[in-house]
Image: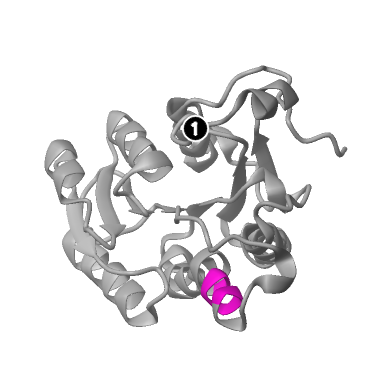
Amino acid sequence: MTDKKVAIVTGAGKGMGAAIARELCNKHYELVLFSPSGATELAQELKAVSIKGSVTSNEDLTLLISKTINEFGRIDAVVNSTGHPAQGAIIDITDTDWVAGMELVFLNVVRLARLITPHFLKQGKGAIVNISTFAAIEPEANYPISSTMRAALASYVKLYADAYAKYGIRMNNLLPGFIESYEIDNLTREKIPMRRAGKLEEIAKTAVFLLSEGAGYITGQNIRVDGGLTRSL
């Protein structure tokens, strides 16, 4: 068993997932990077374990956990980061797309939590951060599936925290606004009080903080990192 902390990052091949993996590496975590590509180049750069698979496959997620335990003997942290579900006018979205969105951004968390929680219980601690979206709090017409499914995730994270906080196990959602990995137009930029897109490293540093002992009294929360975009209290 390694003496270092061990973290799993899903969706680690690019964007926020890759940025979080780099920040965890800077904090001296052993890393397991999971994505459809296996994030092989990044894994080589960070001297991490690379595993190919889909967050929508319970079989792939089961293999992810077993390989991580076999390799390191422990898991301290999990970051659930995925892509975006299909978009479109709300009444035009098909049942297939709704179900696919649920698999991608909601059930991925449910399944991985089911698999990892027994290991956290044995260790007496563990932390999970789910990359969500500002639209979970204030639904956005341009992202109907994401808004809906991540609102469900907001409820799930609270229920999970209620059940497992007493065992030293924490789960939080991180809600990014518009981040620099996607182009935004001037109209969108004007809606953001900071008048800019967020930086990938800002998301990464917040995620790593939420996994750290410094955030040891934070659980069941939806942490907005959106430059002040959302207005609700």
Q: How is the image coloured?
A: one colour
Measured as percent of width and height from the top left, residue 84 is found at: 50, 56
Q: Is residue 137 above or below residue 66?
A: above
Q: Which residues are magenta?
A: 97-102
Q: Amino acid at mark 1?
A: Glu
Q: Is residue 220 left or right of residue 52?
A: right
Q: Residue at x 30, y 75 (%)?
A: 60
Q: Is residue 4 above or below residue 149?
A: above
Asked whether the viewer can see residue 55, the reply is yes
Asked whether the viewer can see residue 221, the reply is no
The residue sitting at the right extreme is: 233
Q: Residue at x 39, y 80 (%)?
A: 58
Residue occupied by mark 1: 183
What secondary structure is marked by label 1? loop
Q: Quadrant of residue 106?
A: bottom right
Q: Foreground residue, 71 or 53?
A: 53
Q: Residue at x 67, y 68 (%)?
A: 163
Q: Main secondary structure of the magenta part?
A: helix
